[in-house]
Image: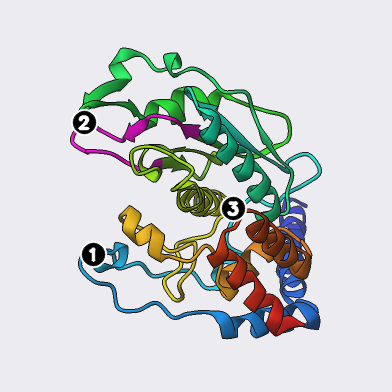
Amino acid sequence: MKKIILFLVILFCSCSKEKVKETRKETLKEIPEEVSYFKQIKSNDIKLGEPVYGDWLYTRKEKGQTFDQYFRSKHIVPTNKVNIIYIRPIGNFNALQNKQIELLNEYLEIYFQLQTKTLDPISNDVVPNSARRISYGHEQLLAGYLLNDVLKEEKPLNRIALMGLSELDLYPKAEWNYVFGLASYRDKVGVSSIYRLQDGELTSANFNLCLSRLLKISSHEIGHMFGMHHCINANCVMNGTNSMEETDRHSIRLCSVCQRKLNSCIAYDNEKRLTDLEKYFKKNNLIDGFDLMKKDLGVIQ
C-alpha cells in the first residue's frame, strides 16, 4: 500500500512540474503585436563599443543575461498586494533637491508603470557615529548600516521595492573612498546618494544634467530589484558603470531586450509607456531622453 501511495505522490509531483513547464512555455508565447514591438525598436539599439581603460567592462567579464534566462529566473512580479515602489529620502534636502525627488517619483511611476510614493524624510541622526566618518573634508555615511539597520526594517504597505536616497556621500567599508549606492536585491531594498551626482552643488544651471543622472541610477538599481542583470550588448540604462563620466555616456533608454524583460515582468502597455516617457522628457527639457522615445515611437507607428 505504501508503495502505491509513494508512486501516486511521485506521479502527482511529476505531472505538476510538467504543468508548470507547459504554463511557462505558454506564457513565453507572447502575442504577435508584442513580439513585433520589440523587433521594431531593436533597430534603435546602439551596440556597445569595446570597453576602454576605466570602463565597467574593461576589468569585469560579465556574461550578460538573455531574455530566456531572465524569464526562467526567480524574480519578483507585481501582485495586488505587492505593487508599490517607495522612495525614502535620508537627510536634509534643499528646495532644488526636493524638486528632483518629486520628479524622480513621477519618472519611476512612468518608467515602471507602477504606483510610486515618496515617504517622509528621515534624519541623518539615525546613523550612529560608528557608521559615519569625515573623508576629504566631507561627511560620509556607511551604506551598509542604512541598508541593513534602517531600510530593511521598513515595511510600507504593498511595497515591491524601496529605494533610500541619501543627501550625504556613502562608503561601503573603511578601505573604500566612496560608493554611489548599495542594494540587497533579495530584499528589494537599496540606498543611493545624490552627493556625487551634483558636481559639488545642485544649481539651476546643472539641474537637468544632475536630474538625468538621478533618473538613470535609480531606474538601474530598481531594475536590478526586478531581477535584471547588467546589459552587455547595447547602450542601455542597465549597463554597469564605474564613474560619473561613464554614467553620462550611457543611455537613459532600456534596449529592446531589457524592455522585453521588464514587460514580461510588469504587464504594461508598451506604447503607452513610451508616450508617457516622451511627454515627461519633453516637459522637463531632457532632450536626449525625448529624442530616444521619439525614435522608438517613430518605428512602431
At a point 23% along the width and 23% down the height, the residue shown is 134
First in sequence: mark 1 or mark 2?
1
Instruction: Specify few, some or many for label 2: CA neighbours under 10 Å numbering under 14, 14-19, or 20 or more.
Output: few
Query: Would residue 92 be found to the left or right of residue 60 on screen?
Result: right
| Residue 118, placed above or below residue 37 | above
Q: Is residue 266 above or below residue 41?
A: above
CB contact under 8 Å: marks 2 and 3: no
Q: Is residue 60 above or below residue 207?
A: below
- Residue type, label 1: Thr
> The residue under label 3 is which amino acid type?
Phe
Circle 1 packing at 10 Å, graded few (<14), some (14-19), many (20+), is: few
Secondary element at image label 1: helix
| Residue in the foreground of this view, choosing between 30 and 190 | 190
Q: How many marks?
A: 3
Q: CA distance from mark 1 to mark 2?
A: 23 Å
- Please tell me whether mark 2 sits on a helix, a strand or a loop: loop
Q: x, y percentage for residue 70?
A: 57, 65
Indicate which disc, 3 or 1, sits on the residue closer to the N terminus: 1
The residue that disc 1 covers is: 59
Magenta span: 165-181
Checking the image for residue 174, the label placed there is: 2
Q: Which residue shows up at 59% across the image and 57% down it? A: 285
Badge 3 density bin: few <14, some 14–19, many ≥20, Cα 10 Å: many
The residue that mark 3 highlights is 226
Q: Residue at x 73, y 54 (%)?
A: 113
Q: Amino acid at mark 2?
A: Ala
Q: Quadrant of residue 283?
A: bottom right
Residue under the point 50% across and 27% down: 93
Res. 228 in view = yes
